[in-house]
Amino acid sequence: MPRSNHSSRGRRAGGPATGARASKWQRAAAREPWSVERVLEPAPTVERAPDGDWMVRHVRPANAVKTYVCPGCGRSIPPGIAHLVVWQQDSLLGARSAFEDRRHWHERCWRTRR
C-alpha cells in the first residue's frame, strides 16, 4: 500500500483542514462561521476623549452571543443585549495589541464614564 508524505494529523474526518498545511483562510473558516448580520454591522467609529482616541463598534443583539463583564459598572452583559466594543486607537504597543485589549461596555456606561 503506498504511503503518503502528508500528515493526516490536525484534519477532522470530512471537515475542513485545520493542521499546519491548511491555509490561513481554511483555519479561519473552521474557527468562525460566516454571519450575514456580522458582515452588516456598522464599521467602528473614532471617538475623541480626554483620555485618548477610541475605536467604538456597536454590537447588535443578534450578534451578542457570549457573556461579557462591563468595565464601567462591573455587571455582566448577557447574550442578546446590544452593547459596544471599545479599544484604543493610539496604543503605544501598536494596533494589534490595542485590538486584543478591547472591552465590551454597556452603551450607557461608556457614555457616562469618567
Image (cartoon, grey):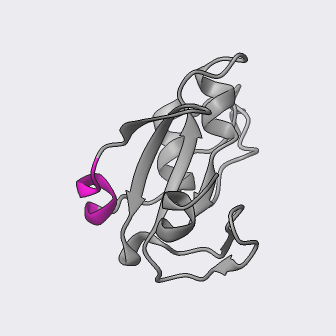
51 shown above or below 59:
above
Residue 68: image quadrant is bottom right
The residues colored magenta run 36-42
Q: Nearer the viewer, residue 106 or 80?
A: 106
Which residue is drawn at the image coordinates 52% and 44% (left, top)?
A: 28
16 shown above or below 13:
above
26 shown above or below 41:
above
Q: Nearer the viewer, residue 104 or 32?
A: 104
Residue 95: image quadrant is top right
Residue 20 seen from this side: yes
Quadrant placement of the N terminus: top right
Please state the horizontal and vertical placement of residue 109, each as a whole percent of the image: 57, 66
Please state the horizontal and vertical placement of residue 22, each as a whole percent of the image: 57, 34
81 shown above or below 112:
below
Which residue is drawn at the image coordinates 47% and 80% (left, top)?
A: 81
Please state the horizontal and vertical placement of residue 63, each as a whole percent of the image: 41, 70
Q: How many marks?
A: 0
Magenta stretch: helix, strand or loop mostly: helix
Which residue is drawn at the image coordinates 28% and 53% (left, top)?
A: 39
Q: Nearer the viewer, residue 73 or 38?
A: 73
Q: Does the magenta-highlighted stretch encompass residue 31? A: no
Residue 23 seen from this side: no
Which residue is drawn at the image coordinates 36% and 58% (left, top)?
A: 34
Q: Nearer the viewer, residue 62 or 75?
A: 75
Please state the horizontal and vertical placement of residue 13, each as a whole percent of the image: 61, 61
Residue 92 in the figure: left or right of residue 25? right
